[in-house]
Amino acid sequence: MGTKVVLLPGDGIGPAISSAVVRILDAAGADIEWETHHAGAGTLASHGDTLPDTTLQAISDVGIALKGPITTPVGKGFQSVNVRLRKALNLYANVRPVKSLPGIPSRYENVDLIVVRENTEGLYSGIEHVVIPGVVESLKIMTFEACTRIARYAFDHAVKNGRKRVTAVHKANIMKLADGLFLDCFYSVSKDFPDIKADDAIVDATCMKLVMDPTQFDIVVMENLYGDILSDLCSGLVGGLGVTPGANIGEKVSVFEAVHGSAPDIAGRNLANPTALMFSAVLMLRHMDKGEVADRIMAAVTRTLQEGIKTGDLGGTARTTEFTEAVVSRL
Ligand code: NAI
């Protein structure tokens, strides 16, 4: 019997790109037993909730999920399913590898860095209130525990992936207490990793340096808001959202997902690019110690792209199913 993975197909283009990924992983012999559950706008009518308890329980029990994009219904009281998932499962590290791909036009050719974002606190704690009409406060929560945990994750990730340097990105010159705590925790953890170079950089200057020469970075680690912004900036350096994977890692549970949304403008038209979800599945396979299958899938996708078979978002003419079969035939 294969290894169990919870599959959340999601909304919009989610079901189409999820079946493409399942097709490729099965064809590659990844030996996965998929357990499909649902979340998102689609479950609101059927379960009365965008994130049913049965889905959360299944992810907790199995420990690993591959998730399609989910539409956040617009309206009062709806919290993003993604935010709820991260909170409920304590998925504290958002990891986004940013790597140039052959066959994908982009500004640089040798980008190979990893963005590690703290996923649970900072300005995204969601604690806001009106002090008096016309004045609001939005609180940035930083704790010793979460800052230390994310720094340790970044250094561990460096060791496990043969990386040499971790840079803490911050604004401690202005937010002396909040980002100062982040930096203190970072340097304190760095002492346990003498073989990894530790340094830090201010977030605005880091944006400039990333745009000028992203090859100067290795692993960058930062709090929630900076991580949200920088990780999108970084996906723009290597070809955009259609090819950028992501992982949400917790102590017991991990959820792998593409960075893009449910693309309602092209849903149901066989036009979606499954590459980003596929690369997320590749991260998942490596996380599950299935590195050999992951390498084979990466090689097949890379060859497909190099041979010019691409979906419309990358300037090609292939439909979702054509691209998928092209990858399968190159495995
Ligand atoms: P989006 O990422 O869905 O779409 C932005 C543009 O990129 C659209 O033109 C779309 O067609 C294109 N696009 C995105 N993914 C593509 C793919 N795989 N292949 C080809 N083209 C692709 O962002 P948008 O429109 O702002 O959000 C739509 C919905 O998705 C919203 O309800 C939003 O809340 C949700 N969303 C969900 C996310 C998640 O579940 N992780 C992340 C971002 C947005």
Image (spheres, grey):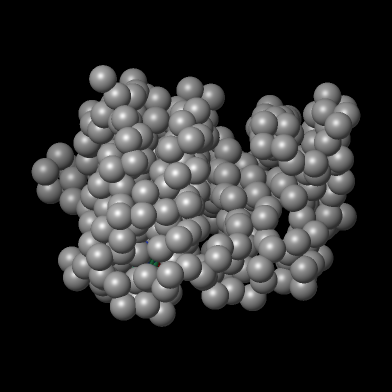
Residue 191, how many percent across, how many down?
Answer: 87, 27
Where residue 60 sits, quadrant-wise, is top left
Residue 21, how many percent across, how many down?
Answer: 31, 49
Q: Is residue 301 above or below residue 310?
A: above
In front here: 141 or 28?
28
In front here: 249 or 25?
25
Question: If the picture is divided into quarters, which one holds ligand 1?
Answer: bottom left
Residue 62, how many percent across, how many down?
Answer: 34, 23
In front here: 143 or 248?
248
* Image quarter in which the N terminus is found: top left
* Residue drawn at (16%, 42%) of the image: 48
Residue 301, how many percent across, how many down?
Answer: 42, 57
* Residue drawn at (56%, 35%) of the image: 92
225 relative position to 258: left or right: right
276 relative position to 146: left or right: left
* Residue drawn at (54%, 52%) of the image: 129
In front here: 149 or 180?
149
Instruction: Mark yes or no: residue 177 visible.
Output: no
* Residue drawn at (48%, 68%) of the image: 306
Q: Is residue 24 above or below residue 244?
A: above
91 relative position to 186: left or right: left
Q: Is residue 255 above or below residue 18?
A: above
